[in-house]
Amino acid sequence: MILVTGGAGFIGANFVLDWLAQSEEPVLNVDKLTYAGNMHNLLSLQGDSRHVFSQTDIGDYDAVLALLKSYRPRAVLNFAAESHVDRSICGPEDFIQTNVVGTFRLLEAVRVYWNELPDRERAAFRFLHVSTDEVYGSLTATAPAFAETDKYEPNSPYSASKAASDHLVRAWHHTYGLPVLTTNCSNNYGPYHFPEKLIPLMIVNALAGKSLPVYGDGMQIRDWLYVKDHCSAIRRVLEAGLVGQTYNIGGWNEKPNIEIVHTICALLDDLHPRHDGSSYSEQITHVQDRPGHDRRYAIDASKIEQELGWKPAETLDTGIRKTVDWYLANPTWVENVQSGAYREWMQQQYSASVKTATA
Ligand code: NAD
Ligand code: TYD
């Protein structure tokens, strides 16, 4: 069994679905179910005994340790985090609590569990920490892409909290010998992406006839990675990554935000034309820029490609088309997120299983 934290969120849920589509090895999914946790993402796993869910905070040391001792996973993959930069600017507290304190408590529970494992299981155990390229700060237009050896210069409360968590993971390896792996990836996109982030927000707003808010001049650059490519990279790092190493994961897809928004509009014009026949790009509005907005992120993914033989399967064109198709095909998922119905449904569905799993 593997233990996945944050497995009801965007990337975590994609990872759990992907894992169970390819492996019989069960997953213990530990998620607090914040606003970003959505069990509708995992509806296809209802009744599948390979998926065990526990509504637990990674910062709840006793509960996490009990789960570890009870289910005895061979690996812990830490996706759980507060993940939205804009929210971190408005209210950084939750980011410190989950990303820093939560990761610390999770590491402590894992360390105790790992220390008590028999030698063979102890040697094979891995703690894989999922992090972001944002820890490296912002690049100028001509600077080379982020490499694993670059220094950390986080600029937002979100990236600072993730950088702190990466340092804790590193220290737990150097000090206690915990067999850790860290991955730093670029901006993900794809199915089940919460519509507060750029790509899903633009799709959902466009279809609802709302404005498409582009921050500042829209010339900020992000390096886009299709979520399923991220999942395959994580599987590869888990199976072949060298303990104590970090791996940058990216799709070689640098694009200014405004181009991404125009691409989405053009796809929607084609696949779901507006009633009045004009382009969705008419809904684009330039709004006030985000404070401290990082200008450019870019990932140099040479290390994972050369050392572990991983490559992304999607280009930005194929990945964005798949993403737009998914949102067009899943209006109920979007409605449930927007109305908040997914939260009421989870309260009814999961309060019972929580007690079973943590008992
Ligand atoms: P998300 O916000 O969609 O999901 C986060 C999940 O973690 C949710 O299910 C939430 O309920 C859960 N969670 C939050 N606090 C928790 C806690 N204290 N205990 C247990 N569970 C908790 O995030 P995401 O986009 O899926 O990101 C997953 C990971 O990947 C994060 O660590 C994030 O920093 C990292 N990352 C994301 C991106 C991206 O583009 N989305 C890019 C680079 C790195
Ligand atoms: P986001 O998806 O929030 O990811 P991150 O800030 O972690 O990179 O934003 C991606 C880019 O899109 C970022 O440069 C901010 C910009 N953006 C907008 O222009 N408008 C929006 O409504 C949002 C949510 C983001």
Image (spheres, rainbow, N blue to C red):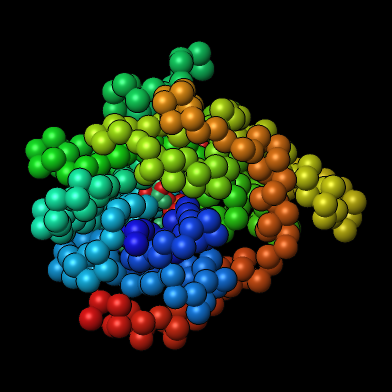
Query: Where's residue 229, x and y in %?
Result: 54, 42
Q: Which residue is drawn at 48% across and 68% down?
A: 38
Figure quarter occupied by ligand 1: bottom left
Judging depth in this view, the residue of 213 and 108 nearest the camera is 108
Q: Which residue is drawn at 59% across and 30% down?
A: 253
* Above or below, comparing residue 295 to residue 264 in the picture: above
Judging depth in this view, the residue of 103 and 119 nearest the camera is 119
Q: In which quarter of the image is the C terminus?
A: bottom left
Q: Quadrant of the N terminus?
A: bottom left
Q: Which residue is drawn at 45% across and 34% down?
A: 249
Name the outermost residue toward the right: 277
* Above or below, comparing residue 79 to residue 262 in the picture: below
Query: Where's residue 155, x and y in %?
Result: 33, 33
Q: Is residue 295 visible?
A: no
Query: Where's residue 263, x and y in %?
Result: 72, 39
Residue 116 is left or right of residue 100, and the answer is: left
Name the outermost residue toward the top: 142
Query: Where's residue 31, x and y in %?
Result: 35, 65
Q: Which residue is drawn at 70% across and 40% down?
A: 318
Q: Can residue 336 be seen in this view?
A: yes
Residue 256 is left or right of residue 12, and the answer is: right
Question: Residue 33's quadrant in the figure?
Answer: bottom left
How many discs mark residues in the rendered view? 0
Residue 109 is left or right of residue 258, and the answer is: left
